[in-house]
Amino acid sequence: MTGDPNEEFLPFSRPSISRAAIDEVVACLESGWITTGPRVKKFEEDLAAYVGAPHLLALSSATAGLHLCLAALNLDPGDEVITTPMTFAATLNTIVLAGGRPVLVDVDPATYNMDAERVAGACTARTRAVVPVHFAGLPADLDPLYELARKRGLRVIEDAAHAIGAEYKGRRIGSFGDTQVFSFHPNKNMTTGEGGAVATRDGNLAETVALLRFHGMDREAWARFGKQGSPHYEIVAPGYKYNMMDIQAAIGLHQLQELDGFIVRRTGMVQRYNDILAGWPQWTLPGNPPYPHRHAWHLFAPLINPGTAGMDRDAFMQGMKARNIGTGLHYRAVHLHPYYRERFGFKRGDFPNAETVSDRIVSLPLFPSMTTDDQDRVIRAMADLFGKK
Ligand SMILES: Cc1ncc(COP(=O)(O)O)c(C=O)c1O
């Protein structure tokens, strides 16, 4: 059976943009100031208060944030940065762009996150930083990682692209530790269209990010063009163009107010998926670590069991698409991509847990405006595809 052609396609993710956010964008467009300005400033203040960070800088993307935090390390050729292969390519790409060598460690097969023990085993005299990824919004076990980083003098840049609103041992991601990078891409728990932010407790890093995000200019445009501003500026470093626009911040200001409600909705739907799918031999459901945490549930991404499902992940995704249901692939392990195989010699077999996850993972539809009926459609389509009575 394939999907009813009259039934609307259900995407795996869809942003929820309120009328207030739309009105704010219109007000921004009509205000005469649409690039970085007062709305970005307000968004940064609100976001800093929400995550509990002393320094917070809004940017054009999380990729930009990772790039700037890594560039600030002034890596020498051969310097190493340890991260996980179970991530989006941007985590590794930015290490390479900043002049570093990505060193990978395998992940826990149940949580898909890396841990301090594996990182300790990969440290060398050239290791400069560690980039843990809070996969799907589940905080990695940070205390042992920070303990290791402190002992070895390593910078920790948390790739928190999935983890806005997540908590580790009662503390919000962004409120403790070294540095965190958030994403506001439309699939994420909150969006600014495209966008990202760096939170840090290091004032020097914050200054460097502020400088490098806008050409290496010692003054921001809106401070120059305002009534009190001076048109002069000086370039003190060759910077990038990674600033967030006020149009983006206009959306973000309202998304931030709704974020906790979005996470509650996501969590409720994940509980329902878990309850329903618990008895299905076709799935291995995501595992829970023993430490206290609040999962942000950016993704609900179980592993398909091809033996009992009678199909592999790609056939499952095709079959769901034929039934008008979208699914997502987050992610193919990055070390298996041609650039990383050819440049760094990674190969299949290097990280067996990540490869198992990479081969079998699939993101099921999950977004705040999804209804119980939508979820029932997903379940019915899966039952039909698996030939389940
Ligand atoms: C783990 C991870 N890191 C970084 C990024 C990059 O985020 P952005 O699209 O905001 O640049 C993503 C985006 O999907 C991601 O999933």
Image: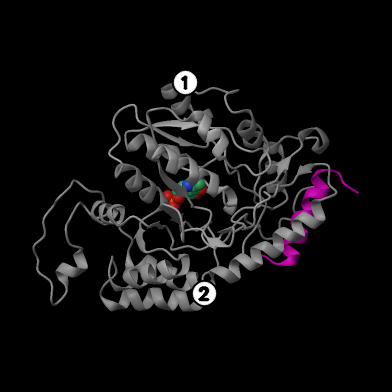
Instruction: Tell me if residue 90 can be seen.
Output: no
Q: Counting residues from the N terminus, which is met first, the one under dot 1 or under dot 2?
A: 2
Q: Is residue 386 magenta?
A: yes
**Looking at this view, is 5 or 184 the one in front?**
184
| Residue under the point 26% across and 52% down | 208
Q: Which residues are magenta?
A: 369-389
Give how far across and how far down residue 336 sits, in percent.
53, 28
Give how far across and how far down residue 46 sits, in percent.
41, 72
**Looking at this view, is 11 or 206 the one in front?**
206
Q: Is residue 41 magenta?
A: no
| Residue under the point 80% across and 57% down | 275
Residue identified by numbered label 1: 345
Residue identified by numbered label 2: 18
Q: Dot 2, crowdedness within 10 Å: few (<14), some or many (≥20)? A: few
Q: Main secondary structure of the magenta part?
A: helix
Q: Secondary structure at mark 1?
A: loop
| Residue under the point 91% across and 49% down | 389
**Looking at this view, is 21 or 163 the one in front?**
163
Amino acid type of the residue that numbered disc 1 sits on in the rendered structure:
Gly
Q: Secondary structure at mark 2?
A: loop
Q: Dot 1, crowdedness within 10 Å: few (<14), some or many (≥20)? A: few
